[in-house]
Image: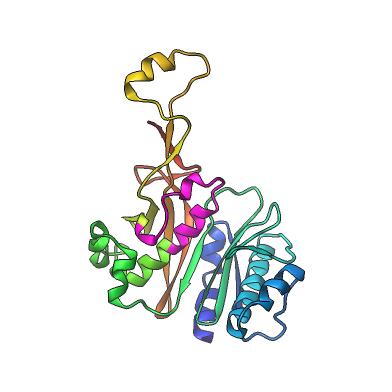
């Protein structure tokens, strides 16, 4: 376990270059306790192991936020999702007793999501992660000089993308995401571009035959489909991997400050 923590600590400069603060905590740390009544109430309903994991994750998130210059008190939850005060946002992940969080400074709008997997997935789990058009990725080089994408790496990358996409305001972007198989992963160099297989639709749906007539009316606009594609980097951590969202990607595989929109 100390080796995994050391490997994660060495990622700080890489994450900082991507505008991310890193927070680490371990379930065995002394002094882990709720930061307020909402955390205490949530922790009281959990088994001892899950309680330590929950508290370690909250502490990791506070440490990640401090790394980008933001203080944060207690972090309540809605369902299983953490709820942050305005101006504060982080993504939390756990594996093998280690909690990791990444955070961005207030005002940054790049996607935010991370995932840690220290236990490799068995091969028969592929059916839960990939669809046939993605199976070839398992033998594809991750970088020019690297090895192939592992099933654990693809699972972790999709988990990080899932979290990032769920932080996008409004439910339309995630309505088609029920399982990881509803996300499609495509390699671009040393990163994966991942997004829903069905693009988000924004605005009124207008039949193609009506467009010329409707477009001439004042105030009318076409519907727009938004490609919610997240760039995700997968890094080795001992026998496992750590994945995090790097930014948005356009249809041509280039970085873009916002999700790509096109008329439909």
* Location of residue 263 in the rendering, given as x and y in whole percent from the top left corner: 40, 30
* Location of residue 8 in the rendering, given as x and y in whole percent from the top left corner: 52, 74
* Location of residue 256 in the rendering, given as x and y in whole percent from the top left corner: 46, 43
Decide if residue 36 is in sight here. Answer: no
| 145 is within the stretch colored magenta | no
At 37% across and 15% down in the image, what residue appears?
212
Decide if residue 178 is in sight here. Answer: yes
Residue 211, placed above or below residue 63: above
Q: Nearer the viewer, residue 178 or 75?
A: 178
Give residue 42's quadrant in the image: bottom right
Q: How is the image coloured?
A: rainbow
Give residue 153's quadrant in the image: bottom left
Q: Is residue 258 left or right of residue 227?
A: right
At 46% across and 58% down in the image, what residue appears?
162
Residue 201, placed above or below residue 18: above
In which quadrant is the C terminus drawn?
Answer: top left
Q: Tell me which segment is drawn in magenta.
A: 159-181
Q: Nearer the viewer, residue 137 or 51?
A: 51
Residue 149, placed above or below residue 89: below
Q: Is residue 160 left or right of residue 25?
A: left
Q: Nearer the viewer, residue 243 or 46?
A: 46
At 68% across and 67% down in the image, what residue appears?
62
Q: Is residue 97 left or right of residue 138?
A: right
| 166 is within the stretch colored magenta | yes
At 38% across and 61% down in the image, what residue appears?
180
Give residue 27's quadrant in the image: bottom right
* Location of residue 124 in the rendering, given as x and y in whole percent from the top left corner: 28, 75
């Amino acid at each position: 376990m100390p080796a995994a923590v050391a490997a994660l600590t060495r990622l700080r400069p890489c994450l900082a270059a991507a505008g991310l603060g890193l927070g680490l905590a371990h379930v065995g740390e002394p002094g882990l306790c709720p930061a307020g009544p909402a955390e205490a109430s949530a922790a009281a309903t959990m088994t001892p192991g899950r309680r330590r994991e929950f508290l370690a994750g909250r502490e990791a998130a506070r440490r990640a936020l401090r790394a980008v210059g933001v203080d944060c008190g207690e972090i309540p939850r809605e369902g299983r999702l953490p709820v942050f005060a305005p101006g504060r946002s982080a993504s939390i992940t756990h594996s093998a007793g280690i909690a990791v969080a990444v955070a961005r400074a207030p005002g940054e709008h790049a996607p935010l999501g991370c995932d840690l997997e220290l236990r490799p997935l068995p091969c028969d789990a592929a059916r839960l992660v990939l669809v046939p058009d993605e199976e070839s990725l398992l033998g594809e080089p991750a970088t020019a000089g690297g090895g192939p994408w592992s099933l654990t790496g693809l699972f972790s990358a999709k988990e990080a993308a899932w979290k990032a996409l769920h932080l996008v305001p409004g439910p339309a972007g995630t309505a088609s995401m029920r399982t990881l198989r509803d996300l499609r992963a495509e390699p671009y160099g040393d990163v994966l571009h991942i997004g829903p297989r069905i693009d988000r639709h924004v605005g009124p749906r207008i039949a193609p035959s009506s467009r010329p007539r409707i477009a001439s009316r004042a105030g009318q606009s076409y519907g727009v489909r938004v490609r919610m594609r997240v760039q995700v980097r997968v890094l080795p951590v001992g026998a496992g991997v750590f994945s995090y969202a790097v930014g948005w990607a356009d249809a041509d595989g280039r970085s873009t400050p916002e999700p790509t929109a096109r008329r439909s």
